[in-house]
Image (tube, helix red, strand yellow):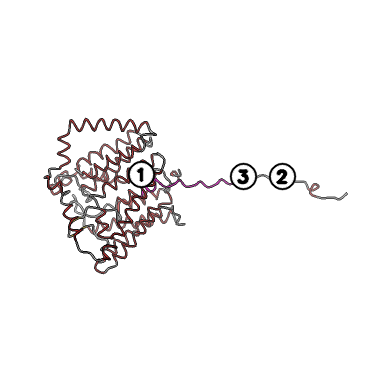
């Protein structure tokens, strides 16, 4: 599918986009890193990613993409609402970042051909990120499992929160399992990625990532069941193992899932519901209702919103909500219309994971890992590029003697 001809700089640019979306807020690290330094690194990564993407695509060739088109339209309410002086300079800065992020995706879309090239780039980069988390755990277990987060795993070398680590682990586990079922990788390579990622996921106690992983894999593998014997065997064994684990380890799994929370705290989704109710009850002008209050840090009243749809509504209004819903629905609809294949299964996993995580995590309206996940899904659903027609072979001309070229009239 043309993936062999993808320049190496494309993978480098993709890795820099991943670095840009890691964020600058999180747990305290072993070596204190100033937030200004972290922001400089992440923003510098985005600038370098755009430069590399432009360098390998100087002719500005792009692939048609409904996802990127709708994402570009999302810039309109973002810029209009962020231009309000009350939104502050930070809102305009975030708009510029989102614009550069989308422009880089457009430049890289030239190599979106329905293959698994970007899936492999995605797995490699997030595996490196998880490697830094594992290294931090080995160097300083106390810093990696702090009491501030209830003993949940955090990034001790780079400030990463438990939900971030859980998200990265769940995504690469799901994609690696699907590559294994599609015979695009071997069992040893898959085990190197899946086993340590499962351990890190368990240490984060992240319910959203765990539910998204299993639900996304169920939908993705279900799309392969009719055409893949390996998928049928894996699905059957997974159901049997899950049933046995539910019976034998039921109490332990329940304790892990509750994380020691009270019933009231669990019902309110760790306090998220109170923030959501306050956000929906707040008075808004017609402009704020339609276009939002400008891009911010995804918080309301000093507390994180932790819901993509409410965060988009708060920052980009109902216009943003409609556009975000449109590109999620379009990607899902295209995936359902594609014939069964490994690329389709990976896309279904990524789309379903992002849809599930959007309920308790923000990020669908701004430059974030979730937009990168959906970009990988869009690359998997893109039609293969048409091969250039081969030039016709030159037919040697027969040499005609001079005496034959003369025409004599008898």
Residue placed most toward the observer, 216 or 285: 285
Residue identified by numbered label 3: 393
Local secondary structure at mark 2: loop
Residue 358 x, y percent position in the rendering: 26, 50
Local secondary structure at mark 1: helix
In the rendered structure, are the residues bearing label 1 and label 3 in contact, judged by CB atoms less than 8 Å apart?
A: no
**Disc 1 packing (10 Å; few <14; some 14–19; many ≥20):** many
The vertical placement of 83 against 354, above or below, is below
Between the C-alphas of marks 2 and 3, the distance is 15 Å
Residue identified by numbered label 2: 398
In the shown orientation, is residue 265 left or right of residue 178?
left
Between the C-alphas of marks 1 and 3, the distance is 41 Å
Which numbered disc, 2 or 3, marks the residue that appears first in the sequence?
3
Residue 338 x, y percent position in the rendering: 41, 43
Indicate the quadrant where residue 207 lies. top left
**Disc 2 packing (10 Å; few <14; some 14–19; many ≥20):** few
**Residue at 45 percent of width and 55 percent of height:** 61
In the rendered structure, are the residues bearing label 2 and label 3 in contact, judged by CB atoms less than 8 Å apart?
A: no
Local secondary structure at mark 3: loop
Which numbered disc, 1 or 3, marks the residue that appears first in the sequence?
1
Q: Which quadrant is the N terminus positioned in?
A: top left
**Residue at 31 percent of width and 33 percent of height:** 235
Residue identified by numbered label 1: 347
Indicate the quadrant where residue 275 lies. bottom left
**Residue at 38 percent of width and 45 percent of height:** 335
């Amino acid at each position: 599918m043309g993936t062999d001809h993808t320049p190496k700089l494309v993978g480098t640019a993709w890795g820099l986009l991943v670095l840009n979306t890691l964020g600058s807020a999180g747990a305290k690290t072993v070596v204190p890193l100033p937030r200004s330094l972290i922001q400089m690194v992440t923003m510098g990564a985005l600038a370098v990613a755009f430069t590399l993407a432009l360098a390998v695509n100087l002719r500005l060739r792009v692939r048609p993409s409904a996802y990127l088109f709708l994402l570009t339209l999302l810039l309109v309410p973002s810029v209009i609402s962020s231009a309000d002086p009350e939104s502050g300079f930070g809102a305009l800065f975030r708009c510029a970042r989102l614009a550069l992020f989308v422009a880089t995706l457009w430049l890289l879309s030239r190599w979106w051909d329905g293959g698994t090239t970007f899936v492999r780039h995605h797995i490699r980069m997030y595996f490196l990120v998880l490697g830094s988390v594992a290294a931090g755990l080995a160097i300083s277990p106390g810093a990696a499992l702090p009491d501030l987060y209830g003993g949940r795993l955090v990034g001790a070398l780079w400030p990463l929160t438990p939900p971030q680590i859980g998200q990265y682990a769940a995504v690469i586990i799901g994609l690696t399992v699907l590559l294994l079922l599609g015979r695009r990788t071997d069992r040893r390579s898959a085990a190197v990625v899946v086993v340590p990622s499962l351990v890190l996921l368990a240490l984060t106690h992240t319910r959203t990532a765990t539910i998204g992983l299993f639900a996304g894999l169920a939908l993705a593998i279900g799309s392969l069941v009719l055409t893949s014997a390996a998928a049928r065997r894996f699905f059957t064994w997974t159901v049997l193992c899950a049933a046995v684990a539910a019976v034998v380890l039921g109490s332990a799994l329940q304790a892990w899932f509750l994380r020691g929370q009270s019933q009231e705290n669990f019902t309110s989704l760790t306090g998220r519901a109170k923030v959501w109710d306050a956000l929906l009850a707040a008075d808004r002008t017609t402009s704020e209702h339609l276009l939002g209050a400008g891009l911010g840090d995804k918080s309301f009243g000093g507390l994180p919103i932790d819901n993509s749809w409410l965060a988009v509504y708060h920052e980009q209004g109902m216009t943003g909500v409609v556009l975000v819903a449109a590109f999620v629905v379009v990607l899902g609809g295209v995936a359902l219309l594609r014939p069964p294949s490994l690329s389709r299964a990976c896309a279904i996993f990524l789309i379903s994971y992002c849809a599930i995580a959007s309920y308790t995590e923000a990020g669908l309206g701004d430059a974030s890992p979730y937009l990168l996940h959906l970009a990988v899904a869009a690359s998997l659903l893109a039609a293969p590029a048409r091969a250039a027609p081969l030039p016709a072979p030159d037919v040697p001309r027969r040499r005609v003697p001079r005496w034959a070229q003369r025409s004599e009239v008898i």
